[in-house]
Amino acid sequence: MRIVRFTPGPDTGLGTDPLFGVLDEEIITVITGDPIYQGIQKTAVTVALSTVRLLAPVIPRSKVICVGKNYADHAAEMGGVVPDQPVIFLKPNTSVIGPNDTIVWPEMSERVDHETELAIVIGRICKDVPQERVNDVIFGYTIANDVTARDLQKVDGQWTRAKGFDTFCPIGPWIDTDFVPGTQKITASVNGEIKQSSTLDEMFFKVPEIIAFISQVMTLLPGDVILTGTPSGIGPMVAGGHATMAIEGLGELTNKVSKR
């Protein structure tokens, strides 16, 4: 099941407030409330996908947790190796934007990079989750771009500023509640040119290990999003251009990049 969050078009008669829905082919069935908190309760109202504006399918009320250096080839291109335990860091929830929104290039940065990632959406409050029970706490999966001001990352020696700007966490286009990570292809392209290409099974720490580890560190809340790391091929996005993150079976997430 694909869950979308959207703003209705002016001709739909559904008002202007964001709504949630279930996407089936090109038709959205509106659901009541937030499905992560209130469950998936369908209404009789439907609307065409072509008449709405998709938003980030989840706005984390609490946090976005990220895993660094989780693909060996990316760790190598950054001059290191995959660590013995997951390296985790946070992005603020204010960095989240949705499909087709604009990534704003900060004035203080000369280089803004793409990082395509599988994102996990947490569906219930949890702590110390055993690996064999992680599916009990996952609401679904989506795509994310862990946008990074690479020059600032090097200057700071840590990642908060470089990855924490507003608009630096595009998420979407929907949450798939049935997706099962396996050997699906994951890519990133800039202005139509492929820059990253790998498969999800190249992740060193898999989803069960990631959730079990993070939930030992901090309580996970409904709507929290976990980014699982990026493969090699990271590089700059083009000011005034666009970038597309894609995962086989999950679709594509495209965002414009503002001019400097």
Image (tube, rainbow, N blue to C red):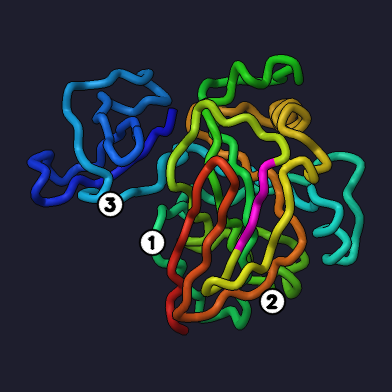
| Residue 185 part of the magenta segment | yes
Question: Badge 2, how many Cα within 10 Å: few under 14, some, many 20+?
Answer: some
Q: How crowded is mark 1: few (under 14 residues within 10 Å), some or many (20 or more)?
A: many
The answer to whether any part of residue 161 appears in the image is no
- For badge 1, the amino acid type reads Asp
Q: Is residue 64 left or right of residue 132?
A: left
Could you say where residue 156 lies in the image, as x and y percent from the top left? 73, 69
Helix, strand or loop at mark 3: strand
Q: Name the residue under label 3.
A: 53
Mark 1 or mark 2, earlier in chain: 1
Give the SS element for disc 2: helix
Left or right placement of residue 139 versus residue 10 in this view: right
- Image vertical order of residue 75 relative to residue 133, above or below: below
Q: What residue type is labelled 3?
A: Arg
Q: Which mark is residue 22?
A: none
Which residue position holds label 1? 101
Mark 1 in CB contact with mark 2 (< 8 angstroms)? no
Cα distance between the residues tagged 1 and 2: 23 Å
Position of 129 relative to 251 (above/below): above
Horizontal placement of 189 versus 232: left or right?
left
Q: Residues within 10 Å of mark 3 (few under 14, many from 20)?
A: some
The stretch of residues the image draws in magenta is 184-188
The CA distance from mark 3 to mark 1 is 10 Å
Could you say where residue 47 lies in the image, as x and y percent from the top left?
20, 38
Q: Where is residue 75 in the image (x, y as percent from the top left)?
A: 84, 58
Secondary structure of the residue carrying numbered label 1: loop
